[in-house]
Amino acid sequence: MVFQNKTIIITGASSGIGKALAIACLKQGARVALCARNVDKLKEAFHSFDKNNLLLQAADVSKEEDCSSFVDAVVRKWGSIDVLVNNAGISMRALFEDADLSVIRNLMDINFWGTVYMSKFALPQIRQSKGIICGISSIAGYRGLPARTGYSASKFAMQGFLEALRTELLRTGVHVMWVSPGFTASNIRNTALSASGAAQKETPLEEEKLMSAEECAHRILQAMQNRKRTFVMTFQGKLAVWLNKLIPAFVDKKVYDVFLKESNSPLLKYENK
């Protein structure tokens, strides 16, 4: 059990991939620190686990002081940090033309700045342990997606930050990586922000046909164990990344067509003119 007796921080762990990662790590015998904006959901999800190996704290990763306080609590409880998984994130579905700028700012604050804050405060401990900093990214970090301008921008920014950080730390023993799941059954699309910043409360995908959060978590832990540089999780994702490098104009058209076909596509606005 590679993560047994390791101290692991996972942000945004009340549902989806974060929750599945946390459960898998706890079952391996890790000490797991979890944060989410709603601590009651965390308590409900993890009430049956050994409290000696678990730390739950309310934290909004878009707030620098929350991130600092969370990391401090982990160090006080266990004295070390071996792995940081920057998982907390939100999405959006709205045309840039229609979206309030606060929506874009909110996505950058959580998806990008949350990663920066947590990495900054955890880094001294991870330097000591020669541990891992991992970001949960997306194909949207390689290829901009229509009606997801803020989401794509935040994931591009996350990947650029982590790549630069990895290069800085190349000879320190710290491993920096990101993983890009494909479409995974989770709550992120239901909570994706609309043009006004309200939760969508619907998903354009058939969630039951998607990869489970548990399978996704299993693959992420394997990638961390093997200290992969990057990990694009699906064939479809790998194909999108490579085609976007080779024939980007063609991919522009294909991506547009794919997202035009989704349920209640925002792109219909441009088709009906």
Image (tube, helix red, strand yellow):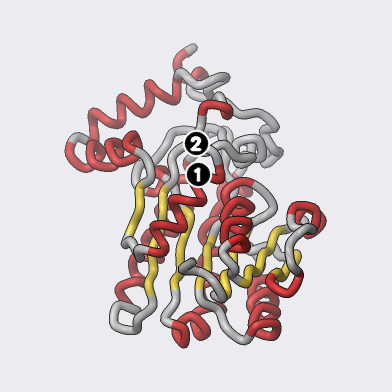
Answer left or right for 86 relative to 16: left
Left or right: residue 256 compared with residue 245: right
Asked which secondary structure carries label 2, the reply is: loop
Residue 96, visible in the rendered structure: yes
| Residue type highlighted by circle 1 | Glu
Residue 60 placed where, x, y %?
69, 62
Which residue occupies the foreground of this view, 268 or 53? 53
Q: Residue 207 location in percent, x, y?
A: 57, 29
118 displayed left or right of 70: left
SS for tag 1?
helix
Residue sitting at the far left: 246
Image disc number at residue 257: none
- The residue identified by callout 1 is 215
Most foreground residue, 227 or 192: 227
Q: Identify residue type, mark 2.
A: Met
**Residue located 54% across and 56% down the image:** 111
- C-alpha separation, residue under disc 2 versus residue under disc 1: 7 Å
Taking depth in this image into account, of 36 and 214 the one nearest to the observer is 214
Total numbered badges shown on the rendered structure: 2
Name the one closer to the observer, 182 or 164.
182
Q: Residue at x 41, y 62 (%)?
A: 224
Residue at point 61%, 29% (across, down): 203
**Residue 11: x %, y % from top left:** 61, 61
Residue 105 visible within the image: no
The residue beneath circle 2 is 211
**Residue displayed at 30% across by 31% down:** 252
Q: Decide: marks 2, 1 in contact (CB < 8 A)?
A: yes
126 on left or right of 253: right
Image spot of residue 196 (x, y percent): 67, 38
Neighbourhood count class around disc 2 (C-alpha, 10 Å): few under 14, some 14–19, many 20 upward: some
Q: Quadrant of residue 205?
A: top right
